[in-house]
């Protein structure tokens, strides 16, 4: 985690930067996947949201994820279900932050990999629940919603695998960059 007051100008700027990166991580790189429920696609927004929580902490990281992912949904035809996306990222942020706290903020390669895999697995669960809610919102029966949501998971599974792989790689690269920048400004 970056070490500064979460209300400082630096924290606000970093939160805004991560928000923009999350939005762009979805907007620029998006591959639609056919599904029975919703309009899922492969993207890097989840990976970047996890990184935001790891670097900015629960409050600012969740805020960046909620605004980045939720804002994308609102501005790109998913407004009716954007609240589900925001709820999902809040849950994932709380879990990631809790795991990091349980690990006493030790960001070893092993621990960051565990967090990335846990976040990816949790995203599969939350996305499945979100798909069920989306199906129910349009009048699908509960049984049909469960089945259709299950068959709509391929994009989520790909995104989750991507998160599990990319978070550790990007975390340590960004950590090195932030340290270099921090030394220049000290």
Image: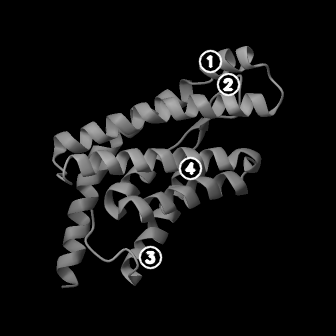
Sequence-wise first label, 3 or 4: 3
Residue at coordinates 84% horizontally, 27% vertically from top-left? 139
Give the structural element (helix, strand or loop) at label 2: loop
Q: Is residue 45 visible?
A: no
What label sits on residue 12 in the rendered view?
3
Quarter where residue 174 is shown? bottom left
Q: Nearer the viewer, mark 3 or mark 2?
A: 3
Vertical order, 177 against 146 (above or below): below
Q: Residues within 10 Å of mark 4 (few under 14, many from 20)?
A: many
Numbered label attached to residue 151: 1
- C-alpha gap between disc 1 and disc 3: 40 Å
Judge depth for marks 1 and 4 and give the one in front: 1
Residue 37 horizontal side relative to residue 16, left or right? right
The kind of secondary structure element at disc 4 is helix
Identify the residue under disc 4. Answer: 26
Quadrant of the snapshot with the N terminus? bottom left
Q: Is residue 68 left or right of residue 98?
A: right
Callout 1 crowding tier (Cα within 10 Å): few <14, some 14–19, many ≥20 = some
Give the residue drawn at x 74%, y 51%: 79
Q: Mark 2 highlights which residue?
A: 35
Q: Secondary structure at mark 1?
A: loop
Marked residue nearer the N-terminal end (2 or 4): 4
Could you tell me residue 45's position as x and y percent? 50, 49
**81 in relation to 34, above or below:** below
Q: Which is nearer the eye, 128 or 157?
A: 128
Q: Kindly state the secondary structure of the residue where label 3 is placed.
A: helix
The label number, if any, that marks residue 126 in the structure image:
none
The 10 Å Cα crowd at callout 3, few under 14, some 14 to 19, many 20 or more, is some
Tags 1 and 4 in contact by the CB under 8 Å rule?
Answer: no
Whole-angstrom CA distance, mark 2 to mark 4, is 18 Å
Q: Position of residue 99 (x, y in %)?
A: 29, 45
Q: CA distance from mark 2 to mark 1?
A: 7 Å
């Amino acid at each position: 985690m970056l070490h500064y007051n979460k209300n400082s100008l630096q924290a606000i700027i970093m939160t805004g930067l991560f928000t923009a990166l999350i939005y762009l991580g979805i907007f620029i790189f998006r591959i639609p996947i056919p599904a029975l429920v919703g309009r899922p696609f492969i993207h890097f927004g989840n990976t970047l949201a996890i990184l935001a929580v790891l670097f900015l902490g629960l409050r600012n990281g969740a805020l960046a994820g909620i605004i980045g992912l939720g804002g994308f949904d609102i501005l790109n035809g998913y407004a009716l279900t954007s609240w589900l996306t925001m709820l999902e990222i809040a849950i994932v942020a709380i879990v990631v932050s809790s795991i990091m706290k349980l690990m006493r903020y030790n960001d070893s390669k092993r621990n960051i990999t565990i967090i990335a895999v846990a976040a990816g697995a949790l995203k599969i669960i939350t996305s499945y629940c979100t798909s069920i809610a989306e199906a129910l919102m349009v009048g699908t029966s509960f049984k049909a919603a469960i089945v259709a949501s299950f068959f709509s998971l391929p994009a989520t599974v790909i995104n989750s695998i991507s998160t599990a792989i990319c978070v550790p790689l990007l975390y340590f690269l960004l950590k090195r960059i932030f340290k270099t920048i921090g030394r220049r400004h000290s």
